Amino acid sequence: MAYTKLNRSAATLTKNRTEGSISPFSGMCVTCVDGCIGMCEIGKSAYRGHEVLYPQPFGIITAASEKDYP
């Protein structure tokens, strides 16, 4: 069970394309399509991996955890 938000974070400037329809197991949009601009963590990390690892803008901010513990 994961307590993090699904493939989106303000710290890495990522978001899901279909906000209301996200698979709870993978965190992917339920209609993940070829040619998507890839603003989720999966798509962005495929092209610009280091930008998803570190909070943006790197070196200027500090990011806290977004986990939601029960």
Image (tube, rainbow, N blue to C red):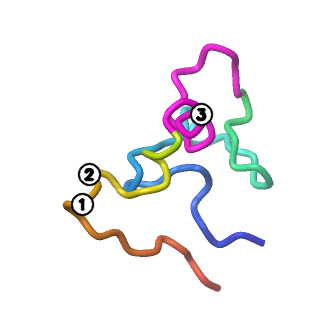
Give me the disc on residue 57.
2
Q: Farthest residue toward the top? A: 35
Label 2: how many residues lie within 10 Å, few (<14), some (14-19) or many (20+)?
few
Tell me: residue 37, above or below residue 61.
above
Residue under pointer 1: 59
Residue at disc 3, secondary structure: helix
Residue at label 3?
A: 43
Give the residue type at disc 3: Gly
Quarter occupied by residue 43: top right
Q: Position of residue 63 (x, y in %)?
A: 34, 69
- CA separation in Å, label 3 and label 1: 23 Å
As for residue 37 lying within the magenta part, the answer is yes
* Residue 21 locus on image (x, y percent): 67, 40
- Across and down, in percent, residue 5 comes to 57, 61
Q: Give SS at disc 2.
A: loop
Is the Cβ of the residue at disc 1 closer than 8 Å to that at disc 2? yes
Residue beneath the point at 28% across and 70% down: 62
What is the magenta range? 32-48
